[in-house]
Image (cartoon, helix red, strand yellow):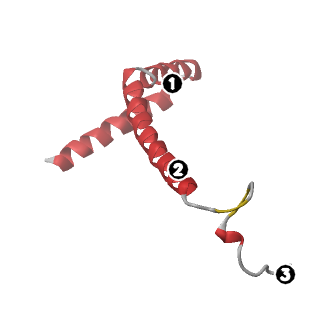
Amino acid sequence: MIEKAVAAVVLVACAALLLRMALPARQRAALDAWWLRLRSGRWMQTRNLWRWRARRAEAEREAEDAIRRAQRKPRRDGNVVRPESFKGPRKPH
């Protein structure tokens, strides 16, 4: 059953693209502009909102990780912070 539905969707898409190719350039441009306006409607706004929430959650996780890294006790030499990664022998260039 699902194979028939997928085949029908593919057939409709191919027919639509074939008809688009048969249109003159001016009508093709008008059809493309209509399609872009349609895509930038409510559906795109909903999708962008969903993505925004995911990006915000990821940014919060990264911020918490950065805060945890910054709160680790670095070695202080007066007013200068000397991270542990600076210890050890230097490699000659």
- Residue that appears at 43% across and 31% down: 48
Query: How many C-alpha atoms fall within 10 Å of the one at disc 2: few (<14), some, or many (≥20)?
Result: few
Q: Which is nearer the N-term, disc 1 or disc 3?
A: 1
Q: Are marks 1 and 3 in contact (CB under 8 Å)?
A: no
- Residue that appears at 19% across and 46% down: 4
Residue 8 coordinates in the image, percent (x, y): 25, 40
Residue 83 coordinates in the image, percent (x, y): 67, 65
Q: Which residue is mark 2?
A: 67
Give the alpha-carbon distance from disc 1 to disc 3, as whole Å.
61 Å
Q: Secondary structure at mark 1?
A: helix
Task: Give the residue furthest to the front.
Answer: 78
Query: How many C-alpha atoms fall within 10 Å of the one at disc 3: few (<14), some, or many (≥20)?
Result: few
Q: Which of the numbered marks, if any, corresponds to residue 32? A: 1
Q: Marks 1 and 3: which is nearer the front?
A: 3
Give the alpha-carbon distance from disc 1 to disc 2, as whole Å.
47 Å
Q: Secondary structure at mark 3?
A: loop
